[in-house]
Each structure stands twice: as structure tokens, then as C-alpha cells.
Amino acid sequence: PADFPSYGWDNEYGERTMDVPDFFASEHMVTNGEFYQFVKEGGYRNKEYWCEDGWAWRTHRNIKWPFFWEQVGPAGSHEYNLRTIFEVVPMPWNWPVDCTYYEAKAFCRWKTEKDGSPTSKPYRLLTEAEHHVIRHKDHSLEAAKNDVNADKVMVTSGEDFPIGSTGSNLNLAFSSQNPVDYFAPSHTGHRDTTGNAWEWTEDHFNPLNGFEVHHVYDDFSTPCFDGKHSMIVGGSFISTGDEASVFARFHFRPHFLQHSGFRLVASDTDAPATHLFAGNFEGQAAARDAAVARGEMSMTDDKQENVYETDESLHMYLGLHYPSSGEAEGIPPILPHAQSPVHGTHFPQRVAKLLTSLDPKPTSNTALDMGCSVGGASFELAKSFDHVDAFDFSGSFVDAAKQMQAGDKTMKFKIPVEAELFEEVDAVLEPGVTHEIAEKVNFFVGDACKLEEMTSQGKIGSYDGIIMSNLLCRLPDPMACLNGLNSIVNPSGVVVMITPFSWLTEFTPRGKWLGGFYDPVSKEPIRSQDVLQKVMEERGFDLIHEEEIPLVIREHARKYQYIVSRATGWRKVE
């Protein structure tokens, strides 16, 4: 809180409310003894347990065991001592292991392969939000907000820190770590939720809502809002002052050592973690982007209207999706001329045909049109699939699609001709879309960033084929959409993704862009297609098709948008 009577770093001010689903967390942090099995069984030699960056770090440093372990005895004997701050001691197997984030994540993968996970998802690290769930209720954020004395460092010396129900190895109570079962557990049954060793989390270091840089130290946090610093929570034996406070939020690069360990966590849902991506390293911009994504503020002082809810936008997309409209009135979609780009018309229909050409394995013979707009691609899909679900975030688009489906003869739209001049034409379905075919489509309003929620509500199921047409770079959180894809695609089903990667802050906060910027550290270009491929492969999809697909959007009779979208096809691994 701004009025709390102590020093704090800029990133510790602000607020965030998060939903934390049920999760499993080990009673204590992983010990030297538990980590020993990973070392002995070749965990440092098996590349499969390491992320790409982690393996590069391990091989560069030629690390074979944790940094503070010292080998004693002959090579291969796996006998170790531990180097502490003041001396080398016989290995205390029941102390928490000191390791990097990379080592912690490698252990999680090894442990999952060796023993399996207690949930449907593999072992992972704690998140900042989960940390606050398992902290002792009398030494927590809520307790400290109600009583300053509950932030123990405000009133307790290091000598007295181990005393009482909230006793812990913090604030230099001791000059080293201690056994993980030395102190009583929190009210949730978890030990060392504060002190002994920092805990690595799944969160990137990130600004809270309302974050502001302090002019006295304006570059403490902001350079590290880069998606390359991982948060650590809880403090260690050597943490004092603010870093021993319940409000402490600290961070380091994943290869750094900071008297930090980890505990095993697993859940049936994705980790409730906050992620930034490379490029979002301007603190106040990051906080602003987060607020925009939540809809609490606009990018300008004036309230931004939804560009897809305007009549102008509706008419433009009706023209794009139903180019045969206007034939009866003698209005072609493109003014006839030499080398006319007519190949750019019928874009939605071409996207739907691309999906069917990639031969998704028929399981349910159903398809999903995500971001269906006014339905042109949905009806084309219905020619090949028994049922098509189609949703869009725009209510006016969905209403228009339903009117087209019903064969509403009064459905008209304006084709721009010149300046304020236009021609009004009847909206007609494309050839081959009969009433029976159109009835196969179920149109509704939906949010591509909330696939899991829509699944739980029964709005969507699982599909043999999915199309995402010029959708990805218009989402406020593209990763939220990509994270939900695997669960709604049948085995050997196909996702066709079309996007020009036209990232704009009016739609997508800069921190959520997949690419299109320079890495703030290496200055290397981060390209959206490269990131997309990595993301999709990590989520169980193989790239099976790539091509460039043009489309033309009419602005008036003599001006058109010519867009070349990147089309990729992804088959779900069985």
C-alpha cells in the first residue's frame, strides 16, 4: 500500500487480482538429497530435460551438478560437499538445493518422466499468486495490510525471527540455510514459504497494475520487464530489510544464483502466472498495456470505440465475404482494369478450402471458424463438414451472419464508390451455399482468448478442423488463444492460421505481440512466424503447410487494401 510505513521498490506498489485454481505443491522445497538423484541419473547430460537456452547455458559452463556442490572422491563416485558462505561442509542432504531456474525446470521434467505427475499436467514451479496462497496466514499480504506488525521484518530482529508460529530462516536469523523441516508449516501445510531460500517461479518479472517509475531510481525495475527475468519469492536466510518483507517482489535472469531453490507444483490447469515477452521492457508502458488489455483505460484520452461494431466496418466485411453481392446491380467487387487483382477476392472461401485440402482426420466431422466475422468462410466449411461452430467477438458481425443464414432478403450493404458516394446492394450468399448447407452453421458471440471458459460452458467442443482468419494479430492476448488450441482439436485434426502479423497497439498491447520487434538484450530481430512455430510445436502441433495468401479489401472504386497474409497449417500430433 502507498501509505505503508516502510521503504519499497517501485515494482512492489500497485495491485493485481488473480484466480488461482486448485494446485498441488510439495510440502517443502526440493532438497539436496532429492536433487542428488537427478544428478546421479544423468540429468545434466540429457538434453531432453532442458529448454534450449538452459542447455546452451549448461554446456557453455560445463555444469555437471549445482554450482555450490564440490566433488570429493574419484570421478563418477557422486560424492559431494557443500560450499557455504564461510566454509565447505559435508553435504547437508536435508537443506534446500541452491540452483538456477534452468536447473529447476530440468528437474521438473525429469521428475515427471521418472515418477509421473499427480495431475494431468507435468510438474512445474510455483507462481507468485500460488506463493501468496500457501504463505502463513499471519505473515501474509492481507495480514500486513490490516496490521503493520504482521510484516514481521518491521518489528523483529534477525535473532528473534525464528521464534513463534511464523518463525523462519529470514533476516539473517542464521548465516546459512537449514533443514527444510526445521520450522513449522504454514496453515496450508507447506514449509519454508518464507525464508531459507528464495523460490523460483513461473512468472516473468512484471509490473503490477498502477505501476509507476520512481524518479529517484528510475531504472531499478523497468530494464528487467523484458520477459528474460524470472521472479523469485519468499526471501532467503540472507534477505533483510525490504527483501524480507511480505511485499517483496524480486527477480533474476534464469542462469543466476541467488540462494534460490524451488518446490514441485502441478495442476490440471495452466499455471496462473504472469508472462511478458521479449520487447516489453518499458515499465510504465507495460503497466498501461495491462490496463488496456483489461479494458480499464484506452490508449488515448478519448474512449476508443470498437472499430468492428461500426456500420462502415460491417459493410466492408460483407463485401469481403460475399463478393457476388452487387452482380445484380452491376457493381463488381473490383473496378475492371488491366491486371486487376481479382485473385485477391473470395478470401474467406479460399481459406475454408485450404483447410479441407489439408485432409484433417475425420473424427467428428465438425469444424470451428474462430473470428468468423460475417460468416463467408463458415458457409464454405459447411459444404465439407457435418457441423460448423462459428463465433466472433463482434455482435453486429454475428447478427449479420445469422441474417445471411436465414436468407433475409432485406439484408443490404453499401459499396463505396467515391468520397461520400456509394451504391447499395443486396447481400447474397456465394454460389453453392444452399439453405441446407447454411443451416449446418451455429453462429454465436465468443472470445478467442477464453477458449477454456467457452469449453466449460459448453459453447464449443473439439473439432477436426479449425480456421483462424486474420485473427491472431487482432487479439488482446494471442498466447491465451494459442494455449487453448490443443484441447479443442481432435487427434490429427488441422488448424489453419492466416495472419499478416499486423501488430497494432489499438488491438494488442505491445507486450503481447509475438514478434515484430528487436530483442531488447541481443538486438536480434524477433519474427512472429518463428515464435509462432515454436509455440505451436511446444503445444503438440506439426507444421504441415505454408503459403502466402493475398486478399483485397475495397475502400472505394479506385482504392483497395492489398494484403498478403501468411497461411500455415498445423496438424495435431496423435
Image (cartoon, rainbow, N blue to C red):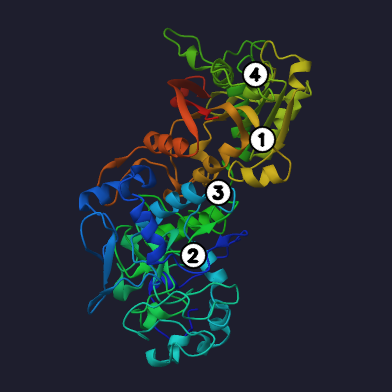
Answer whether labels 3 and 4 touch (C-beta < 8 Å): no
Tell me if 155 is positioned left or right of 370 in this view. left
Q: Which residue is mark 3?
A: 121
Q: Which residue is mark 4?
A: 380
Tell me if 54 is positioned left or right of 293 in this view. left
**Placement of 121 over or under 257, stated as above or below:** above
Decide: few, some or many residues near mark 4? Use Cα within 10 Å; few <14, some 14-19, many ≥20. many
At which x and y percent is residue 362?
Answer: 65, 21
Secondary structure beneath label 2: helix
Q: Nearer the viewer, mark 2 or mark 4?
A: 2
Q: Which residue is mark 1?
A: 391
At which x and y percent is residue 321?
Answer: 61, 22
Can residue 59 be spotted in the picture?
yes
Q: Amino acid at mark 1?
A: Phe
Decide: few, some or many residues near mark 3? Use Cα within 10 Å; few <14, some 14-19, many ≥20. some
Q: Nearer the viewer, mark 3 or mark 4?
A: 3
Whole-angstrom CA distance, mark 4 to mark 1, is 15 Å
Q: Earlier in the sequence, mark 3 or mark 1?
A: 3
Whole-angstrom CA distance, mark 3 to mark 4, is 37 Å
Whole-angstrom CA distance, mark 3 to mark 1, is 29 Å
Answer whether labels 2 and 1 touch (C-beta < 8 Å): no
* Residue extending farthest top: 338
Q: Earlier in the sequence, mark 2 or mark 1?
A: 2
Can residue 5 be spotted in the picture?
no
Q: Which residue is mark 2?
A: 128
